[in-house]
Image (cartoon, coloured by chain):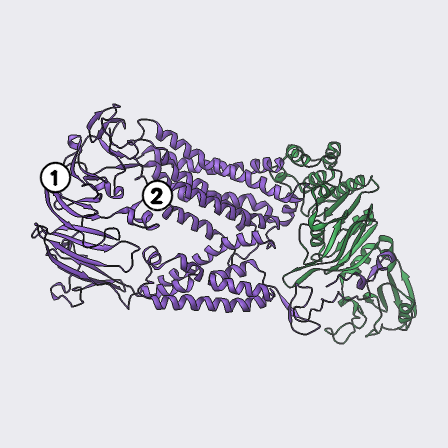
Amino acid sequence: MSDYAIQTRHLTRCFGGKRVVYDLNLTVPRGSIFGFLGRNGSGKTTTLRMILGLLPPTWGESTVLGHDSQDLPPAARARIGYLAEGHPVHGWMRVKDARAYQSRFYPRWNDELFRSVLEFFRVDPKTRARNMSRGERAGLCLAMTLAPEPDLLILDDPAIGLDPVARRSLLESMVYATRHADRTIIFSSHLLADIERMADHIAVLDYSVLRAQCALETFRSCVQQFVLRFDGPPPAVMPPIRGVIQCVPRGRELRLTLVNVTRETRAAMEGLGAASIDEVPISLEDAFVSYLGGSLESARPPEAPQPAAPVAGGVS
Amino acid sequence: MIGVFLRELRENLKWAAMIFAGLLVFVIHELRDAGPMVMFELAQRYTTLLAPIAGLLMGVVQSLFETKPDNWGFVVHRPVRRGGIFAAKCAAGLLLLYVALALPCLIASIWAAQPGHLPVPFQGRMVLPMLADVLAAGCYYFTGIVIAQRRARWFGTRLLPLGLALATSATLFMFVPLFWQAALLILIVQAIGATAAWGVFARNGEPDAALAPRAALGAMIYPGAIGVAFGLFGLSQAFVPGGGRWQYYQVARDGTAVRVTQTIEHGDRGWSYADPAGRPLPQYEGLDLDDPANRSLFIKFGARLVDPRAIRWPLSVLYTNRGYRYPTPGVVPLKAVAPPGVRLRFWPVYDVPAGVIDLFDPVTHTRIGTVGPGGFARGQTPPTRRFEGTPLNLFMQGNSHVMTFDSVVYWIELDQRRVRPVYTAAAGDPIFSAAEVGEPRNPDILVATRGGMHLIGTDGQLRFSVPWEHDPATHNFAAALLPSNHHLIVQTYSNPGVKPSFQDVVEYSPQGVAARRTDLPALTDPHSPKRIETMVFGAILPVAARPFCPSWILDDVLDVRTGEFARWFEAFMWGSAILCAALTLLIGGRCALGMPKTLGWSAANLLLGPAGVVVMLGLNDWPAVERCAACGRIRPAGRRLCAHCHAPLAPPPRDGREIFDPAEDATPLEALQPTA
């Protein structure tokens, strides 16, 4: 048995001329809780659909639980729980209808788990799905996804549109679902607090390209922030420094966020002539925003003579 | 699968209920004032139109949920085969559709079968038109699924799959004579629709790579593309100012043949008159045929002699009503059954399978009795004798006092509750048609046998017999008595589908001598607006269809003039085919289909014409292109290898921000490159 629940090789998907997912080589370890991050339109949902065999890749391949994604046998699908974005469920269904419908497909159906998730979300069993609140609907969908006791749980932005209470319920349900050590969860989200709370591994898609795949702690340690204090105004044009992802001038200070800081990076920073260089702590959220924000405008000191010119100290 | 089936049943029950209720309202409305042919009228007025709409609606609404990819994912991500889900879904949809449509028809049938409800004997075949409509709704159902789920532009090929279903309905309505043939056609079209719908469902509307679904989708789009081409042409004609020009022959009251040319220009109607050789006839100049005073200027040929068995399919269905959709093969309402002015207190119908004329009470709708060759039998008493064989010319029987069989011609006198044999065929000279000619109050009977034409009185007295001058197997005849001298005038036409077409007029004296014979030359008009129609038709008609569409079908069924403008027609047809093949080569290159596929499509479109090009565009993506980094030429953005230099697309460049765990990063990307 492979150590990976999911593996992709050069997975690529084009819509028209746009490569929505480009040459994705992803590995999701078994038993991990895997956070899948990226901005809107970066290709997260498309990737998950390809992994589930719901969308054929333009080229490349992927395997799930050892099976080719595009030819998943029913027995393999029975081991994969999938909660699609937007919590889809037939609007006319009440809880008992949804239970009757879903349980018919899954021999390992855990009715106790189904009921407890519903109670957790305080889902009114008499309400039709179309009349449920977003939280209730999410609860119903999550219960339908968890009750078959899947080995692999794929959740596409499960917290979308949920209030903090419902979101907390969702997370706690996911925590409950991970009581089995060999159960793998992969979920995409924009909510960094959720990622921080849940995930032990992450992958970051930046406009269709995989930029990071690592343990959460690795990511945290690779993104650093430094404050450079100058005696006068900071330099108008910065020399290229490898790994700079954000540069924010503030008076006589320059706040630099960097990735993969090396000895050369430090030397380059020192070459700027700052009076002092101090590393400051950075929250995971700030690290993500800097990493994915691509706020190149802010990386340019205000005194820069040509606003439209490429930023000298930007990503290199 | 049973779970999907039950869910689909539950989910779409409301739509089925709406269809059922809607159709039931129309059925009840029709039954409240039901005529004798109500079962056929129900089909003609309601099920023909409503069943397709219902089928389309059911297919669309059943697929709406799955048009969103996430919802579709929810539906198909289950531990069952996708084909099983599709089969269960369609089984539920078709079951609901058929029950919703069939129940009102069943109610109507049960009602009609009750004695006293209809003034005609109920026959099982009366249900067939409605049954065919109900079954045909399945074709529209699959079309609905394809239209709803397939990702194509609404102003492109999205709606074109409707073409196959519409073409099927038109064929069923006009050309199919027997019910089993209709059922077989429906089954084939449903199989095509189901295959295409499966391809669309299985890939959530993306183009399917498998051959069968692609071919099925192409078969659905193709008739639609042809239909749109004709529709656009018709639409363009509607905005072209001008008019039309028609030529035809008339026979004056003195027996002279006149060529009439009618023109409409800017809404003004005009007529010009000439003899058959084309010389103007000044005596008719300025005559307005719309003026009621001129209504009796020319003879109206009331009698028609035609052997329906000599008319070829599909014209036989169109012209002689020999099809399952028509009542005549089963029951024929008789209107001309007594001398003019005599009012009868019963409703007579000829019951074809029973071989008797049934007389029904018009108020109570109960059977008064039957009339056969043996006379009248009251109430439910069996008739002493029945008519032998099937009457000829049933499609003309309604307004004729003459009932014709192979061996005998009867004169109907239902005011005296009897039929009288007036002509018995000689051995070896069977009858093929008979009709009444002359004044309605004192008519004669013209009997056509294989050997000749016989004019007899209603008392059976033979006036004269003349042999045929033209083969009755390939010609039909219109006859009338000239009011001036009671001469019999017979105009001969080639049967539909017989080329070259021929016409003449022969006038017979009361002694049976041909007093005058006038050949009527074929009417050709180089300025006819049909010339442009014929050219456009040629441009649209696929070369592949030409062997199956001889000129007589095109001209007599589809009303073009391929015989008259043959060169134009052939030139446009082949020119269009070659143009389509060349265009396909260009499109194939742009779509990066590769040389073998491009050549294949090009050969196919040489045969399939412009609609084939539309099908090709509907089945293949129109890819975005970019410049190849290796060779600099244009290549599709969605292909890994350049079609020109075969260089693979470069992997995304690294920008120094990459964060990978040592385990993940240990394998360099280059090592994972698949073999080309």
Which one is nearer the viewer's eye here, A140 or B195?
B195
The answer, for residue A9, to whether it is visible in the render is yes
Question: Is B527 positioned to the left or the right of A248 in the image?
Answer: left
Q: Is residue B20 left or right of residue B485?
A: right
**B231 sits left or right of B290 in the view:** right
Q: Which chain is purple?
A: B
What chain letter is assigned to the residue under label 2? B
In this figure, what is the number of numbered marks? 2
Protein chain holding label 1 = B
Q: Which mark is residue B460?
A: 1
- In front here: A91 or B611? B611
Residue B407 location (% of width, % of height): 21, 39
Count neighbours of disc 2 (C-alpha within 10 A) and say few if under 14, some if 14 to 19, many if 20 or more. many
The image shows residue B463 at horizontal and vertical percentages of 9, 45
Looking at the rendered structure, whether the residues under marks 1 and 2 are on a common chain is answered as yes
Alpha-carbon distance for marks 1 and 2?
A: 33 Å
Tag 1, which secondary structure?
Answer: loop
Q: Which residue is mark 2?
A: B323
Query: In the rendered image, is residue B230 in sight?
Result: no
Q: Colour of chain A?
A: green
Residue farthest to the bottom? Answer: A305
B656, B568: nearer the viewer = B568
Residue contact between numbered discs 1 and 2, judged by CB atoms under 8 Å? no
- Near-viewer residue (B674 or B651): B674
Q: Residue furthest front?
A: B428
Amino acid at dot 2: Gly
Residue B294's image quarter?
bottom left
A258 left or right of B461 in image: right
Q: Position of residue B116 (x, y in %)?
A: 30, 27
| Label 1 crowd bin: few (<14), some (14–19), many (20+), radius 10 Å | some
Dividing the picture into quadrants, the one containing residue A126 is top right
Secondary structure of the residue carrying numbered label 2: loop
